[in-house]
Amino acid sequence: MLRTRVESDEAVAQREGLIRRSSQLMVNWAERWFPDTYVFVVCICIVVAIGATLHTGQPIAVSRAFGDGFWSIIPFTMQMTFVVIGGYVVAMSPPADALLRRLARIPRTSRGAIVFVASLSILMSLINWGVSLIFSGLLVREIARREGFTLDYRAAGAAAYLGLGCTFTLGLSSSPAQLQANASSLPPDLRAISGVIGFNETILTWQNAVVLLTVMAVSLAISFWTAPSRRTSVTAEELGVDLRIDSRADTQSNRPGDRLEFSPVLTIAVAILMSGWVWNAFASGSPFAVLSQLNTYNLLFLMLGLLLHWRPRSFLESFRQAVPAASGILLQFPFYGGIGYMLTKVVNAHGSSASDAIAHCFIGLTDNTGIFSILVGVYSAVLGFFVPSAGGKWLIEAPYIMSAANQTHAHLGWTVMVYNITETLPSLINPFWMLPLLGILKLKPKDIVGYTTIQFLIHAPLVILVAAALMLTFTYHAPVLPPH
């Protein structure tokens, strides 16, 4: 059994620090009790269905909302599927494989490797969370392949997740900040309340930099102190993870029908065809804004993978090997679509949905800007546990959050960021966003959630209090509303 060797080193564990011992207790608990991601999402689904029924008294309407919402995020599901596949295809190309091997040789110790992965994950997430998630996961696999190097595969996997679990909403991947800065993306009712809020009021403020540095420092410190010792580390081999990459059938075929599969002609033709679209996309807007769009990101990664593999046969083989890693996304994401609809689309006799009731319960408790910030953070974290989708959820909740912010004279830009910062915290427990990474690492959520839960327990109160304190450094400005 997996825990046998760790339990035999109990005396060693007792001499380790308090944080590390606490993390190991959490890891042991998660390995024993944390369910598979499918079981997790179905349990949440049942809880939300019961709550929505009690709130609205309309069981048939709740059931109908679940069915209507089940397919509501299929475009996003496919986008996430291609995040995994595109990352895999690029990483399995010879040039990317060489880069990963070079980076994997940098760390000298297991603990250093875990901090190294966490640092790269956090920094890359500020540009694009998809790059952070995929590249960090592949880097962990490459480090784990090093001969004679003992790496706790679970702790390293948790470190690879920190960019998405802690910091991606503080950078250019912040969906609410992107939406608020783009007039054409704002629904008329929200724009009439908040106006357009530029990046200089959200992600480019010095207050956001303070939060980022604080979160990064704390995340790396936790990763360092919770990393198991060499004697108590559990490797990928001990977890039953096969790190080998299937060999690709690149042998030249003599069959005339196969010749194009082994020729770069088609690759060059497709690259030329797409070059005009890529040039137009980047010429029409900010490069960072373009890269923050999942469709653009996925297309660029697939094209990059095609070019790096050069020959279609190699590209097709890598694509085939990548598909199984996305199976959890394809099965489970539709359930989250149903959950979102049950929370937001079914209303009671007063026209209030379950999501509305939760929001008003939190936000209507005070007119103090500091306490208002705390309540927004707590509310965002609570609902984010059930509906982990920052951008789409913001469009639903923003009208009453921003109305309350105006009433309490809270800074609108920082209200967006408080919501932003805390909305991602439940991702450290809810396996929704873990699925692409788990597919790459070939792990289950129970393998890493013990470590990410420690991150959550420390970050949640810290981030909420820091964000609330920083709200007091802002001066309220009434929104600049569009002309009628």
Image (spheres, helix red, strand yellow):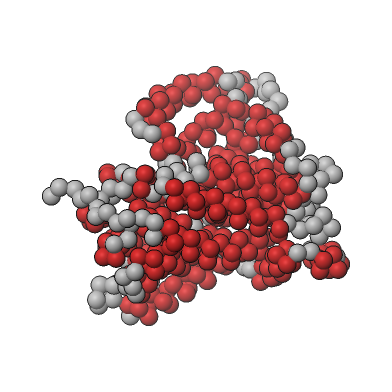
Image position, residue 403 (x, y; %): 27, 62
Residue drawn 51% across the image and 44% down it:
126
Where is residue 192 drawn, in percent x and y?
21, 54
Q: Is residue 423 above or below residue 311?
A: below
Q: Residue 452: name its quadrant.
A: bottom right
Q: Nearer the viewer, residue 216 or 433?
A: 216
Where residue 162 appears, x then y in whole percent?
Answer: 59, 52
Q: Is residue 385 above or below residue 120?
A: below
When the figure is inspected, residue 302 is found, relative to residue 428, above or below; the finding is above
Q: Quadrant of the N terminus?
A: bottom right
- Residue, far left: 484
State the residue at coordinates (47%, 74%).
Answer: 47
Residue at (24, 55) in percent of width and height: 478
Which residue is nearer to you in this view: 122 or 321? 122
Q: Residue at x 63, y 64 (%)?
A: 454
In x, y percent, where is residue 197? 31, 48
Q: Which residue occupies the foreground of this view, 148 or 250?
A: 148
